[in-house]
Amino acid sequence: MNPFVHLRVHTEYSLVDSIVRVPELMAAAAAASMPAVALTDQSNLFAMVKFYKEAQHAGIKPLIGVDAWIRESGERAAPTRLVMICQNLAGYRHLTQLVTRSYLEGQHGGVPMLERAWLDAEQLGGLIVLSGAAQGDIGVALARGREDEAARCLDAWLELCGDRFYLEAQRTGRPGERACTEAALDLAAARGVPAVATNDVRFLLRTDFEAHEARVCIHDGAQLADTSRARRYTEEQYLKTPAEMAELFADAPELLANTVEIAKRCSLVVKLGSSMLPAYPVPAGTTTEDFLQEEARRGLAR
């Protein structure tokens, strides 16, 4: 047995960079004897209900999260990434509040983003937080050789999240990724911070890579055959089996064990099948039903 849980998976509901369909995802996870799998679509929770139902049907523990963009201060500062996974109902409510706010107040160029100032200890309560690998603020600092800045970023996240923060390590073959991952693992070892392996999944099979690239080109308005177009993904970003991940991280098995530990720490129960309506204010001494009937009669009379 090679215990491993995929904690960073985009589905087709990410809208920009995945061709993973939820039913096929669950079938593949079940076939590989995965005990759990995470949903972390980009900036949204659109797939949550379908994902949750399909996971329960397949006998797989559903982990609900979001792969978010963080808007950094400064006009020229590029946004960074952060992955948040719900531990419980409180974390889910905090995550929905953040996602909603990103759409209402944080859109930049049509992309919903979280302002860094919104992320405080209270708002991140009940959430497991992954560093975002090479695209997170720590990874960006390490890629630039700014170890002091990376350490400051780590300190800030630890202050907000405590033991719910994990440094993320990936080995998908993207440019600069190897050096960044090794630096992140060195930082984790030096500071005693747990690290976790993810594969940043965008498709189910290696052979799906070209279809995925076509999907990306549709979103970007680019031609598949254009040799000068941006190539942000590799054919390694498929739903690897636990055995494949164990081989990939054979030198650091604790990174795989930590994925299982995170899955154990998450116990979000979502109540489905009933309407969740707001508590509408009605006059004292009457019920919502009576007030609605009276309003209907008045409207009919008019």
Image (cartoon, rainbow, N blue to C red):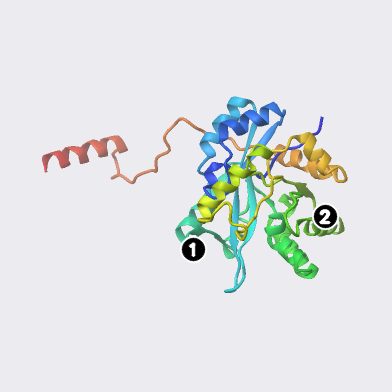
Q: Quadrant of residue 226?
A: bottom right
**Chain-order first, disc 1 or disc 2:** 1
Q: Which of the numbered marks, if any, corresponds to residue 109?
A: 1
- Rendering coords of residue 191 (x, y %): 84, 58
Task: Tell me: residue 189, above or below residue 63.
Answer: below
- Rendering coords of residue 216 (x, y %): 56, 50
Residue in view at x 60 percent, y 59 percent: 229
Left of 250 or right of it: where is 221?
left
Q: Quadrant of residue 71?
A: bottom right
- Rendering coords of residue 121 (x, y %): 64, 57
Between 35 and 21, the residue placed more toward the observer is: 21
Residue in view at x 79 percent, y 50 percent: 194
Left of 106 or right of it: where is 238?
right
Is residue 97 in view from this perspective? no
Circle nearer the viewer, 1 or 2 = 1
Contact (Cβ within 8 Å) of mark 1 with mark 2? no
Q: Which of the numbered marks, if any, corresponds to residue 148?
A: none
- Secondary structure under the numbered disc 2 in the rendered image: helix
Disc 1 residue type (three-letter): Gly
Q: Quadrant of the C terminus?
A: top left
- Secondary structure under the numbered disc 1 in the rendered image: loop
- Rendering coords of residue 253 (x, y %): 85, 42
Is residue 130 in view from this perspective? yes
Between 43 and 281, the residue placed more toward the observer is: 43
Tell me how far mark 1 sits from mark 2, CA to CA: 34 Å
The furthest residue to the left: 302
Q: In which quarter of the image is the N terminus?
A: top right
Task: Tell me: residue 25, above or below residue 128.
Answer: above
Q: Quadrant of residue 63?
A: top right
Residue, disc 2: 185
Disc 2 residue type (three-letter): Leu
